[in-house]
Image (cartoon, rainbow, N blue to C red):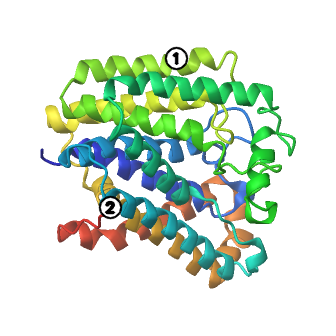
Amino acid sequence: MKRIQSLDILRGATIALMVLVNNPGSWKTAWPPLLHAEWNGLTIADLVFPLFLFVMGVSMYLSLRKGGFRLSWKIGKRALFLIALGLLLNLIGCFVRGKGLAFYRFTGVLQRFGLCFALAAAVVCTLPHKVLPWLSGGLLLAYEGILLAGNGFVHGPENVIARFDSALIPAAHLYSNNGIDPEGLLSTIPCLAHTLLGFLTGRMVAERRTRQTLYWGLGLALGGLLASLWIPLNKTVWSPSFTLLLCGIGTLLLCAFYYLCDEKKFWRHNDFWLVFGTNAIYCYVVSDVWAWILDGSGFHKWYSLTIGCRGALWSLAYAIVCVLLVWLSALPLRRKGIYLKL
């Protein structure tokens, strides 16, 4: 099957948004939609990680189908690479920011990707795919029960997520949002369901069931919105309502891009996003490297104190320049047809 351009576009747009969110000229004057919700709620910034995870699930179907959905060392190698890369970036960042190993963080975005990839691959390669919707729903229901029974929506160290994660990993090695690590271990449960829902979307797209994919996305999004009436939308704990809504948004975006780019060929000038989307891991790493360079040289601090503090537009301008720097570094790979794969 030829490469699905819409998937690369969605992945690329997510990468660009990630760089935009992570690199404001000044955190004090950052454009509000590019700041994460403090607790309950949803902003543009909160779309980044969930869309990444969703796209990974979609891509899983396309890649594992080639091998007949059989477990292999290649799957394990990919998962281990993601985890190892996340740990390495945390280690380098620890030294760049002048923190000692006593505060080295074990968890992170790439570590969660690797763990979810390994768990989801094990599930889809051993269980009939017809049970995956039921399994995903069961995981979300079980997780909701854990949250309700353990103060899971309390923004503090008494939250069950904080207590569970700190019992397994010393608190000094966890990111702390009032004691809660947003990429901790317990909240991997809904993230596994999130990945599986992406996998199911990938199957529909691969089978060109565009209309069914649209209805599936609408159902997930509406289900998430209805559930949010009782279960808060919360990225930090990755609440079930958040999972459903963001998988719905991801499906609808992919469905729209697929119709415009892969089916009707209406949207032809999309190379900007493809530069990011065809070498996503490279862009992810380079975005960290650029941030370290700008921080280490003192340029970001100077900009933050002299220009970025003037207002949201100046802060946003710095973030846009960071996006362009990452894009320029990846442009030669795109032009030479080089796709760095795990």
Residue 241 makes an appearance in the image: no
State which quarter of the image contains the N terminus.
top left
Give x and y (percent) for residue 126: 35, 38
Q: Residue at x 72, y 51 (%)?
A: 181
State which quarter of the image contains the C terminus.
bottom left
Residue at mark 1 to residue at mark 2: CA–CA distance = 37 Å
User: Left or right: where does residue 80 sit relative to residue 139?
Assistant: left
**Quarter occupied by residue 339:** bottom left
Label drawn at residue 32: none
Front-most of 22 and 226? 226
Label drawn at residue 223: 1
Q: Disc 1 or 2, which lies upstream in sequence?
A: 2
Residue 78's place in the image compared with 180, above or below, is below
Q: Residue at x 21, y 69 (%)?
A: 338
Give x and y (percent) for residue 288: 53, 70
The disc labelled 2 sits on which kind of residue? Trp
Q: Residue at x 45, y 64 (%)?
A: 80
Mark 2, residue position = 73
**Image label count:** 2
Q: Secondary structure at mark 1?
A: helix
- Find out whether the residues at labels 1 and 2 contact each other: C-beta distance under 8 Å: no
Residue 196's place in the image compared with 218, above or below, is below
Q: Residue at x 22, y 30 (%)?
A: 259
Give x and y (percent) for residue 193: 50, 34
Few, some or many residues within 10 Å of mark 1 (<14, 14–19, 20+): some
Few, some or many residues within 10 Å of mark 2 (<14, 14–19, 20+): few
User: Left or right: where does residue 94 sit relative to residue 74?
Assistant: right
Front-most of 192 and 240? 192
Residue 200 makes an appearance in the image: yes
